[in-house]
Amino acid sequence: MNETKTNWFITFLAKFSPKEFVALSVSILISIPILIYGFATPTEDDNQRGFTPIAATIPVYDTSGNRVQLFDTSFYISYENNVNDVERALVVEVLNEYLVPYHKLFDRHADYFATPVANPLRPTIEEQANTPRVHNLKMINDHLGEEIEVDYPLYQLIEESVRLSIKSAGYFNPFVGELTDLWTDLLGYEDYPSAYDPLVNVTMRNELERLVSFVPKTPEEIAETITLREDPIHQKYYVTLNPFNGATPGDLSLTLGGIAKGYLTDVMKEVMNQNKLYRGYINGGSSSITTLSDQYFGNPLAVNMASIYRDEDGKRELTPSFSFNRSDTYSMSTSGSYEGKLFVDESTGNQYLRNHILNPFTGYPANHSHQLVSVVSHELSGTELEILSTSLIVMSQAQGVAFIMENYTDIDFNIVYLRHENDGYYLDRNTGFPGENSTYFHLEERYREIFLEIA
């Protein structure tokens, strides 16, 4: 991270000190990862050479007493097994101090008490009525057109999401919250309900088109849909979600799902470095990774990437598509449509992967031949990499390569695409991937390798 970014985060961290916790224990919940992180050719006992996932130990409950999973995924730090209890406890303390309150701030689905109640599992009617609430993303969305005072991290994250949305030409768009909910409902079924797909269901198509009309798309529209106001003297920050195109509550909402994990990995990296906690790497929901050291146990971290390959029955291959290591500190973000559910339009025979990454211009999920994009950099923040991997899934590959050449030349930026064409599976990467001091790259044999011409 360069000096400007470092100073920015130091200033950022100084403005926020969370104090709203109740101490209890929680077990880590690890989801099926996009990325699988291993360790290269161990020569000692696994208990000495391996990693232990360390998670926050404070449970989170909403104002109704429901237990909430942090960031709706598994966010943890993989730390070397052979550290002492004091160092491990410091890692837990960092997670508790940042992961828990940031989740509450960035959540758009749940309300949280700003001060503790006697029993968070069973808040009383009086507590629910009178206890102050966290001014989080949900509060902003629920008060469309009203100015809401927020803590600095939420203010800063919204500011960054708008800036990067404009930089990405709108392919990353934080205003697709209502569209996200529409597709989340459809994808929540064990078997995809094809009869309700908007391509064939008129009612669903009309609703999708209605919601798309409330999504700002041009840089000017995006900038006008959010008003940010800062009072530096009193260190107060205000956000207004403006009703674009006449939107009313339920028509338009912000979502930070495509940026929050990357943002938090940047914060965690800065805090871990400040506390000299270098002996692990940050796993942000399995789609974001940030290393804290050049090497672990004397070797660079080995990374295995998931495969997009499916057999004749549509079952996904568990063998990694490729593996690499890189001998420096870096951040990496991966986005993919490959885990989506297949929808076949019987009238045309066309197949579509219905997934969680949406095209904000059409309202439909991304459906290109490239089903996975992974970006790696020592210089770019995890926040920006998260935006990039999402945007590049939505863009065509030709658009994505042109966008990279226009915006990310002369820096440490590396990219790989995995795509499926009628004649097979391909891996496309820039000639330098995975980047500086690369010591190892191995491609699974069913993929054909193509080198991208990125100047």
Image (cartoon, rainbow, N blue to C red):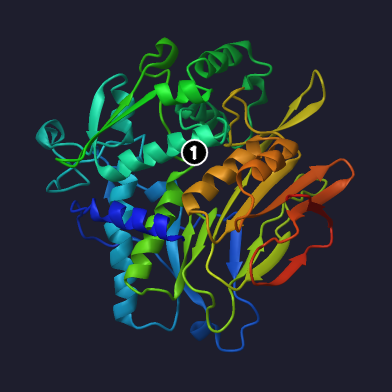
Residue that sits furthest to the right in the current view: 423
Task: Residue under label 1, please give it.
Answer: 164
Coordinates of residue 329 in the picture (x, y in percent): 52, 68
Coordinates of residue 392 in the picture (x, y in percent): 64, 41
**Which is nearer the eye, 1 or 115?**
1
**Which is nearer the eye, 392 or 355?**
392
Coordinates of residue 41 in the picture (x, y in percent): 65, 81
Residue 135 in which image quadrant: top left
Judge whether 57 appears above or below 239 on screen. Answer: below
Q: At 16% from the left edge and 34% from the top edge, which residue is drawn?
A: 128
**Which is nearer the eye, 351 or 40?**
40
- Say which element carries label 1: helix
Coordinates of residue 174 in the picture (x, y in percent): 46, 32
Side of 215 where 39 appears, left or right: right
Side of 438 where 226 appears, left or right: left
Identify the amino acid type marked 1: Leu
Q: Is residue 339 visible?
A: no
Q: At 67% from the left edge and 47% from the top edge, which residue is drawn?
A: 372
Q: Is residue 31 visible?
A: yes
Q: At 55% from the left edge and 83% from the top edge, which residue is drawn?
A: 46
